Structure formats: C-alpha cells, structure tokens
Image (cartoon, rainbow, N blue to C red):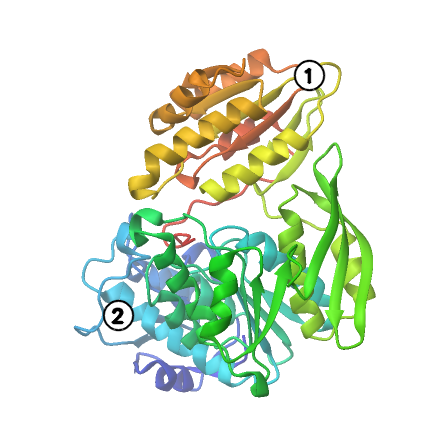
Amino acid sequence: MIPLDLATVAAAVGGRLHRADGSRQVLGGVEFDSRNVRPGTLFVALPGKNADGHEFAEQAVAQGAVAVLAAHEVAAPAIVVPVTGDHVPSRVLALAGDRDGSGAAVLAALAKLAGHVVRRLPDCAVVGVTGSCGKTSTKDLIGHLLAPLGPTVVSPRSFNNELGQPWTVLRAEERTRHLVLELGTRGVGQLAALCATAPPRIGVVLNVGDAHLGEFGSRDAIATAKGELVEALPDASAGGVAVLNADDPRVAAMSTRTSARVVLTGRAATAHVRATDVEVDGLARARFTLRLDGAGGTTSARIALPTHGEHQVDNALAAAAVALELGATVDDVVAGLQAERPLAPHRMAVHRTADGVTVIDDARNASSGSMLAALRTLASTTTTDGGRKWAVLGAMRELGDATDETHDRVGGLAARYADRVVSVGGDARLIHAAAAAAGTGARADHVPDTESATALLRDELREGDVVLIKGARLAALWRIAEALLPPEVPSTGWDSDFVKVAD
C-alpha cells in the first residue's frame, strides 16, 4: 500500500479520528482478520458470523495496527465512519452478521480508500476479469504473463467482491504497474460499483453461464450484470479495451455496450486472438495454434499448455489478449503460457498418489459450465493398467428453477464419461438418480457426506484409476481430495467469516 497518514485516510473515507494521531502512517495495507494484522496495518472492523471485528480492536492495535477502521468508537485509535440509512446491510456480509448496516458502512469507507489509492497511481493499468466460470484461473494467468513486464498485483484466491476487491487494490504500491482484479456479482449494479472503486482500463468477459441463476432469474439478466464491466471502460481514444469471448453470443453482443476498442478471443473465425487445431493429450493437457490477426497480417505459434482441461484454451486466449495489449511480445506470451506455475488449490489440480491413482481435484466450486468442463477433462484423461474413471460429485447451488434439470443433465453426463459415479450429500441425490437411470453401464452410488465418500474411495480405488472430485463450495468436497493426497499437497483455508465468493 502507498504510505498514507491517518488524517489523509480519514478525509478519504469521510470519517473522523478517534483517539488517533493523524500524522501516524499506514504502511502495511489493510486487514479484516485480526490474526493477519502486522505492524503498520489498518485493521478493518467488520461484523462476522461468530464475532464482531470491533471486539478485536485493542488486540489488533497491540499486534501493531496503526488504527482501526470502525463504524463506532472503540477502546483504541480509530477512524470512525458514520452509519446512515444509506448503508443497507451488505449482501456479502449478510450471512456473516451485518444486521444494522455497520458492516456496509465500513465497506463503503474501504471502497473510498481503495479509490483514493487508485487515483494516486495513474501509471497503473487496472484489468478487470469477470465471467460465470474461469475468472480465477484466467486472472491468475494474466498476472503470470504481466509480472515480467512490471510489478503486478493480482487478487488472491477468489477475492472478487466488495471486500476482496478493495483489499486487493490496497496492496498496490507506487511502483505497481498492473492491477489484475477478479470481479464477481450476485446482482445488477454490483459490478458497476466495483468498477467505480477501481476503474478498469481493460475489461475481460469470459462467458455467461448459470452461476447464481436462481438469483438473477435468467441468463440474459446475468449478461446484463456482467456487461457492466465493459460499460465502465474508457473509450478507445483513452486506451479502453474490452476483451470478449467471440464463442459466447451473449458476451460477443457486449461489444455494442462499450466505446472501448473490442478484442475478440475464441475459436470463431471472427476472433482476433484465436485458437485452431486444438488437441488434448492423455492427461487432458491442450495443445493449440495461437493465431493473431492484426494490421500486419496473421501471426501464429504452437502452444502446449501445462494445465489440465481443454477449457483452459479459452482462459489462455483471454490472458494472451490482455498481455499483448500491455506490451508483451508474441514470444513472451508463448513462453508464459507454456511455463509451469503454481495453481490455486482445488482448481483443476491433477495429482498422482503413491498408490498410482490420478486425482483431478476441482473441488473449489461448481456451476453447470465448470461441471461440464471437469467431466470432459475426466473423459480426456487416460487410465492405466485397466483402471476406471470415477466422478465424485456434489450438488451445484443457486440454480433456481433450473436445479432439477441441471443436476439431471450432469448425472447423465457423468454416467457417460465415468465408470463409477459417486454423489455426495443429500442435495446430490438428483445426480445419483440420473446416473443410475442413464443405462450406460456406469455404477452409481450415493453417500451422505464427505467422510463416507472418502471411506468408499479408500476401500475401492486401485492403481490406474482416475478420480474427479467436483462440487459446490458448500459441499466441501475438497476434504475428500485432501484425505486422498499426501500431506505435502497444500491445504486451502477457504473458509472465511467475511469473504463470500460471488460468481
């Protein structure tokens, strides 16, 4: 974070100093979890489902926090922001205890502070990434490609909402040249608000799926919300660029909603950054020819992705388009896309156990689009020594009226692509019923919880098997993956009082 004294912070957020020396500087960013506070931090007091952050104010200061950003006075140096009738309890924090709007007031102040910092960084290119699935993988890949070009800050994990986004922005320093932000939404107007906090110069829209269909009501409504990103971009003369997926009609149609220059990606002939001749190996790693159409003609290069799943080609094209816009050469992009790099846990991570079982751990979350991509990855992965393919699946969430139809389709596809289908949890019974009725010869089992699933797999997996683990975050199927894998495979720490992921 750029150094800011408390008086400047108070002015930026519309708060007042309480028991605080306005000349003291915030040097260590902001933290909303008191366990992460370090010297120089500004501690953000938020209501949680188990406790109120205001109760930890003194502890945070004792650990080195300069002050607390709070909605009411505390027994510690603080910047206190007013709670008004405008502060409707936050959707992000609604499940975590924000009953009176105090959390929303603090979040509004945090957004103002992030906006203040962005305005102090005119040479920093802000990139926003949204879509119904693939945001985190694409955001991470963009950061990977941009890092050699200059200091780059990237949203960690899936910090994509009204808390995670400003938290990420406030990691930027004066030397930061690229700020890559994952942007999620659960309702019309939320993306626009995030873009007002940190106005993007480049916006990436990957796809419009059915994540949170129950809240939006239709895919067209989801497209309306996702398109707020391209509407927030500056026009072409000011450097605005909209990177849109030409293969998704709802995304491609967003070109009419922006005055930014449009760069299309995909496999369609209309795409400016295009993939042709796509092939997939026995570990579901894609190879393709990258074709770039420009004023000087067409440039092409063959690329072999180290990641798993043919859908990674779409993410790679979007990342390549952003990197090229920000100064990367074609050679830079080819080298970056092919380089091995650390991946976010439980996102299409492929491991081999000591017993010779291949585990495809994609248990972080699930929508119908990501579930289909995961099942296709399972289908493309080769077994050895007569092994079998297993699909261990949890339910998908927030599908509204499409819940039954979507789970039925997934169950049928699982029975088509796998030899064994294991549905986990009561909400996944629809998957089991569809798999059992599919008539493909696949065996379908249903178990009540992750412990039962783990026990079944430990008893019946054998050398040469391939097992896909996939489900909604609340299904917690990542516990199965971690039980099967050796302890050196890192755990996640996905559970959080405050950061609720918005797809």
Q: Which residue position holds label 1? A: 387
Residue 85 seen in render: yes
**Could you say where residue 256 lies in the image, as x and y percent from the top left?**
47, 73
Task: First in sequence, mark 1 or 2: give its number.
Answer: 2
Instruction: Answer with left or right where residue 350 lies relative to residue 500.
Output: right
In the structure shown, which secondary structural element does the residue marked by tag 1 occupy? loop
Q: Amino acid at mark 1?
A: Gly
Q: Amino acid at mark 2?
A: Ala
Distance between mark 1 and mark 2 Cα atoms: 58 Å
* Relative image position of residue 485 (x, y in whole percent): 62, 29
Looking at the picture, does residue 252 appear above or below residue 81?
Answer: above
| Image quadrant assignment for residue 425 | top left
* Residue shown at 64% from the left, 17% from the top: 388
| Near-viewer residue (96 or 425) | 425
Does residue 411 sit above or below 131 in this rendering? above
- Determine whether 217 is above or below 366 in the image: below
Q: Tell me residue 262's x, y (percent).
A: 58, 73
* Residues at circles 1 and 2 in contact by the CB criterion of under 8 Å: no
At horizontal 76% and vertical 77% (from top left) the residue drawn is 295
Observer-nearest of 109 and 141 = 141
Tell me which residue sits at (46%, 65%) in the image: 165
**Which residue corresponds to mark 2?**
71
Residue 411 pos. (x, y %): 45, 26
Q: Is residue 316 above or below residue 399?
A: below
Q: Nearer the viewer, mark 1 or mark 2?
A: 1
